[in-house]
Image (cartoon, rainbow, N blue to C red):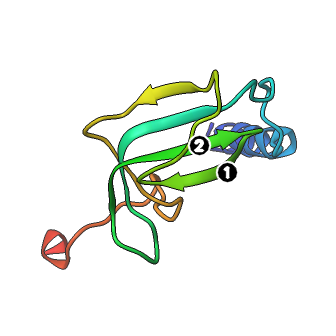
Amino acid sequence: MKQIITKMVLVLVACSSALAHDILPVSSQKGAVALVNVTIHPVSSESIPRGTILFEGGKIVALGASVDLPEGATQIDLEGKHIYPGLISACLLYTSDAADE
């Protein structure tokens, strides 16, 4: 029985790896999108309270405390929220050494 379960798990892992790819099954961004009133935590400078991040064509084109938004840009108000660079993996578990004792 263990061999059957092991083989099934291996087949599932192999299939999921074969089907994985970098292309997202969504349409491309239409128009400009701005995340406003958000605290931005850049890597190499001080935090920007009530900042704005502007996206166009799926890429960040402007970021800061004062960003001119194009006409018709969709604004998403994130007051009270914080944005960090993509350096934090949500899959990692951090524990202290005391937790292991």
Q: Tell me whether circle 1 and circle 2 mark residues in contact (CB < 8 Å).
A: yes
Residue 9 image point, x, y percent: 68, 41
Q: Residues within 10 Å of mark 1 (few under 14, many from 20)?
A: few
Q: Position of residue 56 (x, y in %)?
A: 71, 39
Snapshot quadrant of residue 2: top right
Determine whether the residue tagged by mark 2 lies in a helix, strand or loop: strand
Q: Earlier in the sequence, mark 1 or mark 2?
A: 2
Q: Which mark is residue 7?
A: none
Lateral position of residue 3 relative to residue 26, left or right: left
Q: Residue at x 80, y 46 (%)?
A: 17
Q: Which residue corresponds to mark 2?
A: 54
Task: Please name the amino acid that badge 1 sits on.
Answer: Val
For residue 61, which numbered disc appears in the image?
1
Question: Judging from the image, what secondary structure is the residue with disc 1 in?
Answer: strand
Along the line of sight, the residue nearer the viewer: 70 or 84: 70
Quarter of the image with the C terminus is bottom left
Up-down relation of residue 25 to residue 4 (above or below): above
> Which image quarter: residue 26?
top right
Quadrant into which the N terminus falls: top right
Q: Nearer the viewer, residue 101 or 34?
A: 34
Judging depth in this view, the residue of 91 and 9 nearest the camera is 91
Which residue appears at 33% of the width and 64% of the height?
A: 47
Tell me the residue at 74%/29% (across/down).
29
In percent of width and height, residue 55 lies at 64, 41
